[in-house]
Amino acid sequence: MMQIDEARALDRDDPFADTARLFDLPQGVIYLDGNSLGPPPRPALDALARAAQMEWGHDLIASWNTADWMGLPLRTGARIARLIGVDAASVIAGDSVSVNLFKLAAGLVMGGAKGVAVERGDFPTDGYVMEGLARLSGTPFALIEPGTGVAGLPDHVDVLVRSAVHYKTAAKVDIAAEEREAARLGKTIIWDLSHGAGLVDLKLERDGAKYAVGCGYKYLNGGPGAPAFIYCHRDVVEHFAQPLSGWMGHASPFSFKDGYAPAKGVTRFGAGTPAILSMSTLHGALAVFDGVDMAGVEAKARALGDTFLAAIEPLGLACVSPPSAQRAGHVSLVHEHGYAIVQALIAQGVIGDFREPDIMRFGFAPLYLTHEAVFEAGTRLVDIVRSSAYRDARFAKRNAVT
């Protein structure tokens, strides 16, 4: 069984010790929910204050030019591009994951693709959006079996929306293998990177991916409701008809002409006016990744998960996450009283989350977590389960957000 001294030894050569100092978490809190909402790094709060107080508060509307608010979605996208392994000019930040999924899937259907699909058990909102698109367009919608990927698509369906990292299990998909199969079958994949961007060492361009979306508020630490992003490969973007043809995707938005003409490149995926305060926060948050080796980030995430699993080994809880080599940034455990256990942990300063029907999720963001803290979180979980402290009635009360 692992001991606390072993966990401390793993922290001695932590390559992210300096990065951790950019995060100011509350005293006494072990935050294991960065896979759902990342904490604010200081550069994010500084950027928000500057945008609110100086750019908006002092320079007012002039900041569309003087602070380059107009260019902020592309500048933010360029920072994200490095983290997902694509060309800097192929990513734009804005809107939400759901809206961006609609843009890509609807554009593909408008371009002649037949049908859209998701895997059963993948993140539900992706399926909801595809169902809505099917009702709107008349294109077929399909739910395919988990893990079958593009090979599981029926003949009448051409487009698969698939998470690169599963939101419950943290299982990673072999993107390169899936893209090779998609090319062989003549199918298209839209990747949802929400649980991978900023954590997994993604190489989308190398692996043949052409379309992807992702959120800005998990491992990218952009704040609640932070803008999402959209990636479209340069080989296909100039022929892509973006269906939400708003003025920020127009070739010349301030010409105010009747009739839509798409902007060049990924800029065409703009729609409405960007949310500048939240976009500024995300842009600032991404500064913590400057010079960071993403392979090292992913490796530490897996190692932190292993430390946690070693700490809770005496409990013998079922784990639905795969072994370390196939796992991304969180670990999911099963317990019939999982909700109450998570609430009891939160009361002791260990913040994780719960997913129906019985999944306890614990996320391991490498930029600010240590092995010692993760081991301590595991020992508190052991104590709560062994003592049955979670049976206190207050921990059974269901909150709106779990």
Image (spheres, grey):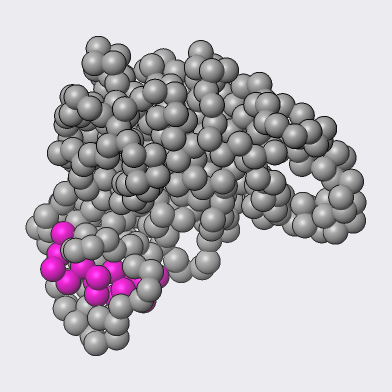
Kindly identify the residue that appears in the image at 68 percent across and 26 percent down. Answer: 261
- Residue 224 location (% of width, % of height): 53, 58
- Quarter where residue 207 is shown: top left
- Residue 105 location (% of width, % of height): 41, 34
User: Taking the image as drawn, is residue 341 in sight?
Assistant: yes
- Vertical placement of residue 174 versus 169, above or below: above
The residue furthest bottom is: 393
Left or right of 392? Residue 7 is right
Kindly identify the residue that appears in the image at 54 percent across and 31 percent down. Answer: 242
Q: How many marks?
A: 0
- Quarter where residue 31 is shown: bottom left
- Residue 392 location (% of width, % of height): 23, 85
- Quadrant containing the C terminus is bottom left
Nearer to us in this view, 302 or 370: 302
- Residue 9 location (% of width, % of height): 35, 44
Left or right of 173? Residue 59 is right
* Residue 345 belongs to magenta span: yes
The magenta-colored residue range is 334-350
